[in-house]
Amino acid sequence: MLRKCPSGYYPTVSEKAFIDPTAIVCGRVIIEDNVFVGPYAVIRADEVDEQGQIQPITIKSDSNIQDGVVIHSKGGAAVTIGSRTSIAHRSIVHGPCSVGDDVFIGFNSVVFRTTIGQGCVIRHNCVIDGIDLPDAFHVPPVTSIGPGFDLGSIEKVPPEYSSFSESVISANHALVQGYKKLVNEL
């Protein structure tokens, strides 16, 4: 469901994207081509800053926001999800936040007040809060990273995780095409 927020913003969604009918997309949200937004996802850009402004939540092309994901922002801050990025089931991305291209964020992970570099893989049940991750970092399952964390202790993304991330993008791109076809048949 697409909804206007109290400040008057209404989502801008590419005709080439697919938003599941159970998802809620509200306010100043921009969704580009070939984005898949799964069942029960919530994407809300509706809080204002001290000047009454709202920066957008932008989801760039070929990304997927899976079932039950929440993307929101504190005080009107911007959130950007890069191209070909996967946000897996029940994760939370809370702004201010920027997620680079070709990123995978695993099940039940939380990302807040951070910039995630391109090509990072954050596995399931992780928390990244208040610290930026450089490109191509691999965050093992059940890892909590915040200010003072030694980023030198994190390895680069192994090739098998990069290829897994690419397969998730491909599968979700096929879902966009399949669901768009079904909608056109009704």
Image: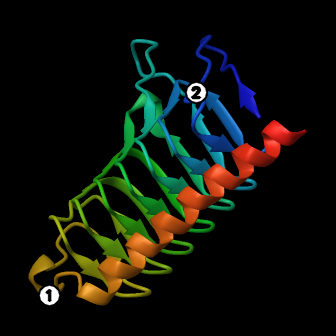
Residue at the farthest right position: 186
Is 170 on the left or on the right of 23, as rendered? Answer: left
How many labels sit on residues? 2
Residue 79 found in image quarter: top left
Looking at the picture, does residue 154 appear above or below residue 104?
A: below
Task: Give neighbour class at mark 1: few <14, some 14-19, many 20+ (Cα, 10 Å).
Answer: few
Q: Residue at x 72, y 40 (%)?
A: 24
Looking at the picture, does residue 150 appear above or below residue 5?
A: below
Looking at the picture, does residue 106 appear above or below residue 41?
A: below
Q: Nearer the viewer, residue 60 or 92?
A: 60
Q: Position of residue 154 (x, y in %)?
A: 18, 84
Rendered image: mark on residue 46: 2
Q: Where is residue 84 in the image (x, y as percent from the top left)?
A: 38, 56
Is residue 73 visible to us here?
yes
Residue under numbered circle 1: 153
User: What element does badge 2 sit on?
Assistant: loop
Is 14 on the left or on the right of 156, as rendered? Answer: right
Question: What amino acid is found at the position of numbered circle 1 in the picture?
Answer: Ser
Is 82 on the left or on the right of 126, as rendered? Answer: left
Is 97 on the left or on the right of 124, as rendered? Answer: left
Question: What amino acid is found at the position of numbered circle 2 in the picture?
Answer: Asp
Q: Position of residue 26 (x, y in %)?
A: 65, 30
Q: Which residue is drawn at 68% across and 62% down?
A: 67
Q: Tag 2 or tag 1, which sits nearer the N-term?
A: 2
Rendered image: mark on residue 23: none
Q: Which residue is drawn at 62% across and 66% down?
A: 90
Q: Which of 127 and 99 is in front in this view?
A: 99
- Colour scheme of this structure image? rainbow
Q: Which residue is drawn at 55% across and 30% down?
A: 14
Task: Give neighbour class at mark 2: few <14, some 14-19, many 20+ (Cα, 10 Å).
Answer: many
Work out how far the residue at label 1 is from the one at label 2, CA to CA, in angstroms: 37 Å
Position of the C terminus, as image quadrant, is top right
